[in-house]
Image (cartoon, grey):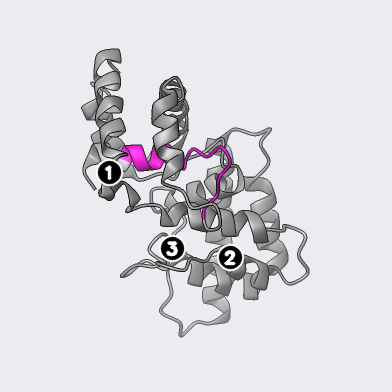
Amino acid sequence: MQLKLIQQSLQEYREFLSSPAAHEHLYAWESQRIFQDHWNIEASDFGEMYDRSLDNSQTRRLWKRENYEPKSRMLELIALDADMVRRAFQDLFEETKSVENRASRFVFYCDDLLQTYKEKYPLSTENRHYHDDHYHMISLYLAFRFPAQYAIYDHEAFKMLLQKIGSTDIPKVADLGRFVKVMRTLYGFLHKEPKMVQLHQQRLHPKRHYLEESMLVMWDFCKFCAGV
């Protein structure tokens, strides 16, 4: 990564924050607030809690698109074995372990549950749980649970960001560990610009969005740099 290109990209993002287009991705901050309000790992009805924790008044695109329904699939797995899913999330949110290992174990849990689901419902055509798809949903869970520590992973946008800031090592496959490190590094640069932080905060609605420190701004920055 080249410092000059990082600074140039941040300056472009600062100008973007004053434009109407800067409001396009704010739905993520609404969902982050909803998650913070409703998530309870000890909930007696884990499925109902999970369902309420992932919601939005404008769009479901973070967890429901064409041929992509990880929330619906997770609800099916919870109905199958809520205690195992609860353990999977407890393990994912155990911050004393590396994020790479936690993500891999979460996928293992989902794979195991999906296999059990297919055995119980042999006529079902469901053969994916979607949580191994470039770690998008896993990073979403982490970003919503620990707002100041994680951003949502968009693999293609991340690759384009790295190209824009001069990296010569572009990952061919999903690399959640590297993504987390790069986002935290760039977040440090962004927070050295008080005006940029102010412009970002001015976008947020106090009754709708999550207002505390949140690295979702790096997800937004990443998508801005990628032009998506």
In terms of depth relative to the viewer, which is nearer, 170 or 109? 170
User: Of label 3 and label 1, which has the lower sequence position?
Assistant: 3
Above or below residue 168? Residue 68 is: below
Badge 1 amino acid = Glu
Circle 1 SS class = helix
- Tag on residue 63? 3
Circle 2 packing at 10 Å, graded few (<14), some (14-19), many (20+), is: many
Circle 3 SS class = loop
Circle 3 packing at 10 Å, graded few (<14), some (14-19), many (20+), is: some
Tell me, yes or no, whether the highlighted magenta stretch contains residue 19: no
- The residue tagged 1 is 156
Badge 3 amino acid = Trp
User: Of label 3 and label 2, which has the lower sequence position?
Assistant: 3
- The residue tagged 2 is 113
In terms of depth relative to the viewer, which is nearer, 53 or 116? 53
**Is 178 left or right of 93, judged from the image as shown?**
left
Task: Tell me if residue 69 can be seen.
Answer: yes
What residue is at 47 percent from the left and 56 percent from the top? 131
